[in-house]
């Protein structure tokens, strides 16, 4: 199923994400996804996130699909040139994996193989454009595909709370132009900023899913403030997490914060994307608290 | 124009087999040459008595001048088991080709240097990509100003305007955006999707 | 010679969309680099102007610029180039030039050319591309053949298997690099070694923005430090810098040329057979720009006849004196009474009488300099000694610090300067420390340590560095309120006043890697260079090059039977550097190092073509002949000789 169909039907689309392990046994994450994420629309599978080498996103998507879930294939331009990217897209389509989220990808220097050659032959915009071409039965080299062309739900990302929102919006516009059909956002902790962003972003007419990263503790929040692009956790939230360490540890505080943000933003967006970073078990609770 | 840096001491030590003849190329010294380190190392070797001779000159990459210079040291080169060259990769290869099959070794690693003219490197770069993007980017090169050489906008990895790879480097695309906003040219964000052409050596094709 | 020009004009179909929306255009075209220097103006500009013409665009102006990416020089003239009413700038250059211009002002700037894509770097002789600057040289494991450039796939562990008949699968004209590597290693008997080495992988993190940015920053700082251009030749001062001064043994014969200074030769006032004493005047100044000459030994004049001159390369009238070894001082030599009460005019009179000239090399009569006729803000005492090898001034600073300071104060008094600055390069920390200590209680004298860079000791560079003032073309230091004196010169001034001794001896460094026993000597003027060398144990190598002065501005001495002059700061014996002049490749290095901000590459072109008017237009007369351009020239062009020819021809032209 393409999640664009859900948006078209006017559903409030809920997605979450899982990160594949560094190894070949993925039974654990499949079981967990089945248990906690079956109720939502689809599950993102990250592509060697933070440039750390892991089992492939496509293989994990296939396993999730076999387990009855709807995967969203995250695809970055970091490790593959245009030949590999197109080939992998065709492979995904053959498996019936049609939800693809196009990303440029972190730089290789940030991960666990800093010596690696960064590829970036294409970027998120040209990757979306390439997907649009493949859907028309033509590849990037201008050659005809044999047989039925693939059909994708082409997703992209945007950071509404970035320190440079206007630059973000310019790129978002290019992504739309290149064929992006929906957006998932970077984590939002300041609903007012998100709402302001949506005021401008709605002109593109594409559904936007509010991004939520579940806060585990004050340390994590501070770390993200220092190091993660497009994320800013306000001081009050950090204080809240630091205030009751027990509640934070059990996840209660993080879940509450997440639910509040969702409630505040829900009228302005078309869905929510929850990045629980290993705490997938909390997803149902967040949704319940948020009234979804 | 290139930058040369001495290889690791152990690496260079592993090249020492028997007697050596040393060549220093000072041609690009004004750009960069590890003169003091090289001198110190060569003094150690001389004290050990393994140096048959030293030629310190410039532009050994110049094949017309190299033979003239090597001529004076013919006997010293013959007496050596290896010729150790302190220069960029071009110099090592010119010597190695001229002296083949003599064993010629490189004692330096070569780094690229922005700016191609004169001896003063430039703060900004042109990567000679062969498909100038500057018209679309307000005169800021996305190939060199962006760590990922993206041509359709920023990757989203910048934090407080600084690049995810090097927090001391400004995000190239944020710079481009500001420049375009200043000159009223934000409409270039509406141009069609851009894709690199990596077909190399354009100059060959043109001939 | 390969053509490595970096750009090509974009096609009209590519240019049209950008031209469509733009009018009132100013066009800048770079004169290109890394190609044969055929014509001054490249054709791209007129091709572009034909297009703007066809499209009916208003062009406010156009200009050809050399090395557009040379920010310092381009910026200098930029504002005056741009015509009023310009709205858009189109730049015909590689990306460097476009970005240089785009950074200048707010005008929309367009690239009218594409850079050409080269994989790999070529040498400075424009041969093949040979190095990719990968920062992890593999040549040691590949027998000196680069696998990164020569193999289309940059493979590091052997061939891909795609080669057919030894030719690459990508380019059938190219040999498979790995087959070449195999053959080379086999010929060297190194196959075992190759097979035994560990698997090679590239480390792409070695080259990153930070590494390069740090290099660039350091390099730019040193290049633009104090003044534009200059070079950093190997100093080689360690050969003699720590050897204390020794008085050179009394020579048997001295040959004292009557022309040891800028201006008219002195007129002899002795003849063969005369007995002379040390300090006795033997030649009198022959005009405003001239200098007295004194006997440096006591003894008998053997001849007054033409003798070979070391720096003029021809015979000039000289006084030959045979020493009686007694060193009897002339009666005229006596200390000045009450030196503190001397008036500026009295000081200059003594200096004139003592035959003191600039002892740093130029030999300009010092008394002329000390009558500037303009207010002087500071006297700069030039203790840079920026010429490699030379250590004479360094030793004088260390061993005659008090005399030097005395001399400086005399000069300050003569030109009525409120301030004296002793400028010493940072490669002489002991001298800096000593002079700082000795001047700490003198209110208006300071010691300034400056970063070593040649030709810092040149007047104009020193003034720029220390006072931040630019001596305009054709003007003198006094025009910007400066007076520059050399260390040995003020020491001579001190002797003239404190001892009454005219300029009859000086300190000479006898050094160089081929001088057996380098040293620093107090030498009587007129002593034979040959004797000096013999005293220093002779040469380690017969074909060593002997120079009077430093390696940069010194004079080659084909015959060493020549005398030490007032301006002889050193005699050096250095390694010869056989070289072959090849064609200019427009690398721009000479422009980058010229401290006078000239374009030396044009001087060689115009000299070859006999275009003297053009030579004049390119300000050849501003050249200070520091030889930086020749030092850096990758084509080994004898630029200074061509410039000298040019200057002589330009003088003829102006006289006409």
Image (cartoon, rainbow, N blue to C red):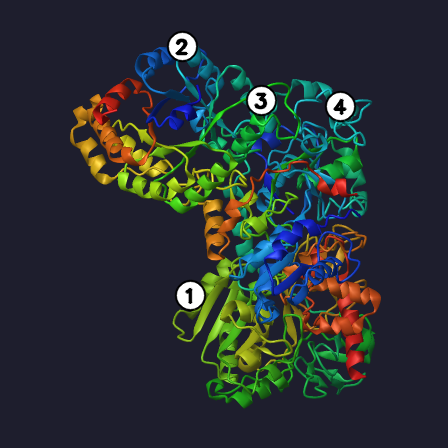
Q: Residues within 10 Å of mark 1 (few under 14, many from 20)?
A: few
Question: Mark 3, mark 4: which one is toward the viewer?
Answer: 3
Question: Mark 1, mark 2: which one is toward the viewer?
Answer: 2
Q: How many marks?
A: 4
First of labels 2, 3 by sequence position: 2
Residue hosting label 3:
A149
Mark 1 and mark 4: Cα distance apart in space: 65 Å
Q: Residues within 10 Å of mark 3 (few under 14, many from 20)?
A: some
Q: Is the residue at mark 3 from the same chain as the one at mark 4?
A: no
Mark 1 and mark 2: Cα distance apart in space: 85 Å
Q: Residues within 10 Å of mark 4 (few under 14, many from 20)?
A: some
User: Please, which residue is most extreme toward the front here?
Assistant: A9
The one nearer the camera, C59 or C454, is C59
For numbered disc 3, what is the local secondary structure?
Answer: loop
CB-based contact (under 8 Å), mark 1 and mark 2: no
Residue hosting label 4:
C182
For numbered disc 1, what is the local secondary structure?
Answer: helix
């Amino acid at each position: 199923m393409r999640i664009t169909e859900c948006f078209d039907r006017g559903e409030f689309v809920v997605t979450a994400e899982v990160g594949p392990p560094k190894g070949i046994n993925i039974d654990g994450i499949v079981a967990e996804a089945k248990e906690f994420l079956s109720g939502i629309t689809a599950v993102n599978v990250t592509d060697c996130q933070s440039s750390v080498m892991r089992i492939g996103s496509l293989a994990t998507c296939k396993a999730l699909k076999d387990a009855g879930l709807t995967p969203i294939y995250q695809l970055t331009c970091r490790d593959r040139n245009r030949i590999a990217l197109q080939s992998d897209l065709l492979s995904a389509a053959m498996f019936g994996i049609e939800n693809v989220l196009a990303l440029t990808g972190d730089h290789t220097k940030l991960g666990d193989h800093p010596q690696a050659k960064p590829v970036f032959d294409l970027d998120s915009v040209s990757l979306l454009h390439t997907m649009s071409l493949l859907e028309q039965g033509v590849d990037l080299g201008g050659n005809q595909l044999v047989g039925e062309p693939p059909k994708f739900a082409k997703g992209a990302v945007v950071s509404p709370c970035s320190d440079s929102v206007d630059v973000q919006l310019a790129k978002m516009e290019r992504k739309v132009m290149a064929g992006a059909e929906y957006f998932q956002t970077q984590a939002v902790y300041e609903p007012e900023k998100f709402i302001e962003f949506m005021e401008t972003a709605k002109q593109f007419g594409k559904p936007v899913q509010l991004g939520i990263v579940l806060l585990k503790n004050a340390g994590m929040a501070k770390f993200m403030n220092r190091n993660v692009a497009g994320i800013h956790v306000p001081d009050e939230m950090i204080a809240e997490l630091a205030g009751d360490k027990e509640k934070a540890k059990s996840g209660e505080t993080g879940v509450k914060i997440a639910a509040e943000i969702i409630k505040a933003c829900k009228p302005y967006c078309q869905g929510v994307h929850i990045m629980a970073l290993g705490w997938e078990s909390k997803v149902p609770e967040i949704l319940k608290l948020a009234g979804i | 124009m290139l930058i040369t840096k001495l290889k690791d001491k152990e690496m260079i030590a592993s090249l020492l087999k028997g007697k050596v003849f040393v060549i220093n190329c000072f041609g690009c010294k004004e750009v960069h040459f590890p003169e003091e380190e090289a001198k110190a190392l060569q003094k150690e070797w001389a004290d050990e008595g393994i140096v048959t001779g030293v030629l310190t000159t410039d532009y050994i990459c110049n094949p017309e001048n190299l033979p003239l210079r090597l001529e004076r040291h013919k006997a010293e080169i013959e007496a050596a088991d290896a010729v150790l060259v302190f220069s960029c990769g071009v110099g090592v290869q010119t010597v190695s080709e001229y002296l083949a099959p003599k064993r010629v070794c490189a004692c330096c690693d070569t780094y690229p240097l922005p700016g191609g003219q004169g001896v003063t490197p430039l703060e900004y770069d042109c990567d000679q990509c062969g498909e100038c993007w500057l018209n679309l980017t307000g005169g800021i090169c996305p190939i060199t100003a962006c760590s990922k050489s993206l041509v359709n906008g920023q990757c989203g990895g910048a934090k407080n305007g600084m690049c995810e790879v090097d927090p001391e480097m400004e995000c190239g695309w944020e710079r481009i955006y500001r420049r375009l906003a200043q000159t009223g040219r934000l409409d270039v964000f509406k141009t069609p999707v851009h894709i690199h052409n990596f077909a190399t050596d354009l100059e060959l094709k043109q001939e | 010679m390969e053509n490595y020009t970096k750009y090509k004009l974009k096609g009209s179909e590519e240019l049209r969309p950008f031209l469509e929306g733009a009018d009132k255009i100013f066009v800048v075209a770079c004169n290109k680099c890394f190609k044969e220097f055929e014509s001054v103006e490249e054709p791209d500009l007129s091709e572009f102007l034909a297009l703007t013409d066809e499209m009916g665009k208003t062009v406010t102006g156009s200009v050809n610029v050399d090395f557009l990416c040379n920010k310092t020089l381009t910026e200098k003239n930029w504002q005056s180039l741009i015509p009023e009413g310009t709205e858009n700038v189109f730049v015909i250059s590689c990306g460097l030039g476009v970005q240089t211009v785009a950074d200048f002002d707010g005008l929309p700037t367009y690239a009218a050319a594409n850079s050409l894509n080269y994989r790999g770097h070529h040498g400075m002789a424009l041969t093949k591309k040979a190095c990719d600057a990968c920062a992890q040289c593999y040549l040691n494991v590949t027998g000196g053949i680069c696998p990164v450039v020569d193999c289309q796939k940059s493979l590091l562990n052997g061939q891909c298997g795609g080669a057919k008949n030894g030719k690459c699968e990508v380019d059938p004209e190219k040999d498979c690099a790995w087959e070449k590597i195999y053959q080379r290693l086999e010929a060297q008997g190194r196959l075992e070694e190759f097979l035994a080495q560990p698997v090679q992988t590239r480390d792409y993190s070695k080259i990153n923005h930070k590494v390069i940015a740090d290099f660039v920053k350091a390099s730019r700082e040193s290049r633009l430090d104090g003044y534009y251009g200059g070079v950093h030749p190997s100093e080689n001062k360690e050969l003699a810098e720590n050897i204390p001064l020794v008085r050179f043994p009394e020579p048997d014969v001295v040959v004292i040329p009557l022309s040891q200074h800028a201006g008219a030769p002195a007129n002899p006032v002795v003849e063969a057979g005369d007995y002379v004493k040390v300090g006795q005047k033997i030649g009198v100044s022959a005009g405003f720009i001239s200098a007295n000459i004194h006997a440096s030994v006591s003894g008998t004049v053997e001849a007054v006849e033409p003798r070979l001159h070391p720096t003029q390369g021809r015979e000039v009238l000289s006084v030959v004196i045979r020493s009686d070894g007694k060193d009897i001082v002339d009666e005229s030599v006596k200390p000045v009474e009450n030196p503190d009460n001397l008036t500026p005019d009295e000081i200059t009179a003594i200096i004139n009488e003592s035959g003191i000239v600039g002892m740093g090399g130029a030999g300009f009569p010092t008394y002329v300099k000390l009558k500037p006729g303009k207010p002087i803000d500071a006297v700069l005492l030039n203790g840079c000694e920026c010429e490699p090898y030379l250590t004479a001034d360094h030793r004088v600073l260390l061993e005659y610090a008090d005399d030097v300071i005395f001399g400086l104060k005399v000069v300050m008094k003569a030109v009525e300067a409120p301030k004296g600055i002793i400028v010493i390069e940072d490669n002489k920390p002991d001298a800096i420390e000593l002079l700082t200590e000795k001047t700490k209680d003198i209110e208006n004298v300071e010691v300034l340590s400056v970063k070593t860079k040649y030709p810092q000791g040149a007047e104009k560079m020193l003034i720029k560095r220390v006072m931040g003032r630019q001596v305009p073309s054709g003007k003198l230091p006094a025009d910007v309120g400066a007076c520059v004196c050399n260390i040995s010169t003020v020491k001579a001034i001190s002797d003239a006043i404190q001892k009454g001794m005219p300029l009859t001896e000086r300190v000479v460094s006898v050094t160089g890697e081929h001088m057996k026993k380098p040293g620093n000597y107090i030498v009587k003027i007129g002593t034979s260079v040959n004797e000096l060398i013999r005293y220093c144990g002779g040469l380690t190598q017969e074909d060593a090059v002997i120079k009077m002065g430093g390696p940069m501005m010194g004079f080659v001495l084909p015959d060493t039977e020549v005398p030490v002059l007032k301006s002889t700061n050193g005699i050096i014996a250095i390694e010869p550097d056989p070289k072959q002049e090849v064609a200019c490749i427009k690398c721009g290095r000479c422009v980058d190092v010229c401290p006078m901000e000239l374009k030396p590459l044009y001087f060689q072109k115009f000299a070859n073509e006999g275009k003297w008017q053009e030579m004049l237009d390119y300000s050849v007369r501003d050249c200070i002949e520091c030889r930086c351009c020749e030092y850096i020239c990758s084509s080994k062009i004898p630029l200074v000789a061509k410039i000298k020819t040019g200057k002589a021809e330009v003088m003829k032209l102006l006289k006409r």
